[in-house]
Structure formats: structure tokens, C-alpha cells
Amino acid sequence: MNVTRKDRAVKTSAWFLYTLIVLEILFMVSPFAAYYYSIYATPLSLLQASPYTAWLTMYVLPHFTYTDSWLASGLVLIAWPLMLLGIVVFVVGFCQIYWAKFTGKGAVAVGLYKHIRHPQYIALAVIGLGACLYWSRLIVIVAFVSMLCLYYFLARVEERICLEKFGDSYRAYLERTGMFLPRSLEARWRGLDWHLPESRGRRTATALGYYLVTVSMSIGLAFLLRQHVIDGIQTDVRDERVVVYLAPLSAGALESVSSLLDETDCGDGLFYVGPSSWAVPELGLRRTNAPPEGVATSELRYPTTHGNPLLFDPHHVNVVKVEATYAGDEPSGLRRFTHALDLRPTGFATLDLANEAIVTTEYTADSQWAGIPTPTF
């Protein structure tokens, strides 16, 4: 059986979506992140230009803001372990399949392939899941779910080719192994009997329906999780001002910040407040005091707060005023924060909460991500 044009299109689409998902996170953690990530700025800005597509650029999980949600923190914590696990499984599967080809043993039925037929697809899916959790833009989630659907059909194509090539031996292999999980686990939902109709038109329509339902459910769950995350972020909402706290502060500290902002001539708008020992490049929030002695900043040690430790001096904080981008007219109340698509720092101040004093005030702030859509919490 020859590979058809449709089969090649499925395979190309799957790899294209996988590349979009994984390269974004690889670019973000590279020394040339600002340069590489600027490539994504144009299509992301085009999406943000329309209220019908702007939501695709929003984030679900926190990237630099502390939340008291154990669920959100747990998902961020397992992102890198999942990616590393996926890489290991992929390499093992790669070695097994190409060793079989090199030795001329035919279809691979040992190692991982003894239990499941497509371990490398599972590995790529695990890597993609980790990338989605770490860099949880909604468009990345949609691409990830689409990739999983394409992998399923791509696996079916490969199995049809192998059946023609290896005949009864491969048919026996199909009967004793699972497609993506061991057969004993897959048997638990095999009874759902999700078979596609025989008619080509109805089969295509049914497959498309399954895909749309899966994507819609994924988006719905993502928005529920996003709201759960936002509920766990410390905020102070006034009529004309929303203050987002990157790290948890006491009630007294919150009151002091509010009073000091009232004294400034730029007390309205959207503000982010973080410890003076924190640095968040996406916000233009720079470190004005060193972290406590013996406490080092590290993305691997503190992934839920962008490498900033939760041990800090609660009496000295930095404030960044930002100008937010919205899909339509500027909203009011908390929606100034929740519906922000992109942030541009416009002011920077250092506050001494112990003495209730404004130490410095600057009306410009720098961000290395200027012009590039970045996380908003």
C-alpha cells in the first residue's frame, strides 16, 4: 500500500503543530530568547488585533505570579519533569526501532514496542504536555490537542502500511499490544466502541465532530482552570485601580501599598507589586535589593514564581505601572487584569513599607520583551 497525499498531509500537519509547541518553550529558555521569540510576535499580535481571536494568546497557568492554588502550582512543578521523561522515552524508542532496522529484524516487537505500538508518539505527547503546562498559552493548548488527534490518525496510517508489508505477523502483533498504552489498560475503554462510519463523507464529518468536541472541552476546562488560578492571586481592586501582588503580603503591607499609591500622581490604572529582591523581565521589574543571604534565585528551584524565592524582605517592594493591551475598549474593575493581553511598563517605584515612604519614582521602565506578547500573570 502506498502512502497517499492525504496521509502525507496528516503527517506534515502533526509535525508542524508539534514544532510550534516545543520550539516556543525552547526559544524562551535559550540565551537568544528575545531574538527567537520575536518571530512569534507578528502572528500573536495579529491574533490580538481581533476580539474573536485575542483570547487565544491568553495564559492559563501562572508564569511569574504566586497563587495559593496547589493545583496550579503542582501543574507548573511537573512541567519540566514531564518534558525530560518524554525525551528519555523518545530516545529509548528511537534507539530500539533504528537498531531493528539496522540489524534487519523487520517490525520492532521488543522493549517498549513489546507492550505498545507507538511509544515515540506517547513520548512526543508527554513532551508537548510539559510544554503546555510551562508555557500555557491557549493557542498552544489548542495546537497540542490538535496534535494528539493528528497523531492518532497518523498512527492508523502507519499500521495500515505495516499490515500490508508484514501481513499476519503484524496482525498478531496488533492483537497482543495496545496502541498507545498496554493492552490491559486500553481494554478498559475499548468497549466505548468509537468506530467511524464506513461512508467516507460521514466518516470525515464524524471525525471532525469528535475533534471539535475535544477541542471545545479542552478550551472550557482551560478557562475554568484559568479562573481558579486568578482567584488564588492576591489583588486589590478599586474603581480606577487594580493592583496585582506577585508575592503574598500581609494585610498591613497591602494597606501601606494602597496608601502610598494614593499619594502618587499616577495612582490609577494597572499595577504589579513584587518584593525588591524579585526580578521579572516580562514586566520590567528589576531587582533593587539582593535576595536574603544564602538564598539563590533559580528557575529550576522556584519554577512557580519564575525563579524568585518566597523568602524575601516584606518591608521593601517595587511597583511597576503597566499599560495593558485589550481586544476592545478598556474594561473596568478586575477585568483590567484578567482581560489584559499584553503589558508595557510605563512607571517604576520603590516603596519602604516599614516607614511608609516612596523611596524612588521613575516614569519609564524597561522590558526586554518590548513589542512581544508576554504572560500577564
Image (spheres, grey):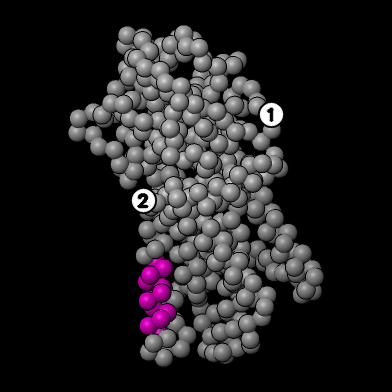
The disc placed on residue 294 is none
Q: Quadrant of residue 298?
A: top left
The disc placed on residue 31 is 2
Amino acid residing under circle 1: Asp
Amino acid residing under circle 2: Pro
Q: Residue at x 34, y 39 (%)?
A: 307
- Alpha-carbon span between mark 2 and mark 1: 36 Å
Say which of 191 and 280 sits in front.
Answer: 280
The image shows residue 73 at horizontal and vertical percentages of: 42, 39
Residue 148 in sight here: no
Range covered by the magenta-colored residues: 89-100
Say which of 356 and 369 sits in front.
Answer: 369
Is 92 in the magenta? yes
Q: Please rate how many residues cluster around mark 1, counting C-alpha atoms within 10 Å: few if below 14, some from 14 to 19, many from 20.
A: few
Q: Residue at x 44, y 28 (%)?
A: 365
Q: How many marks?
A: 2
Q: Please rate how many residues cluster around mark 2, counting C-alpha atoms within 10 Å: few if below 14, some from 14 to 19, many from 20.
A: few
- Direction from residue 332 to residue 306 in the image, left or right: left
Say which of 131 and 195 sits in front.
Answer: 131
The reply to whether callout 2 and callout 1 are in contact (CB within 8 Å) is no
- Direction from residue 44 to residue 61 in the image, left or right: left
Say which of 104 and 258 sits in front.
Answer: 258
The disc placed on residue 329 is 1
Is 336 in the magenta? no
Q: Mark 1 or mark 2, which is nearer the start of the sequence?
A: 2
Q: Residue at x 31, y 26 (%)?
A: 288
Quadrant of image for the N terminus:
bottom right
The image shows residue 181 at horizontal and vertical percentages of: 49, 67
Residue 196 in sight here: yes
Q: Which SS class for mark 2? A: loop
The image shows residue 239 at horizontal and vertical percentages of: 60, 15
Q: Residue furthest left?
A: 294
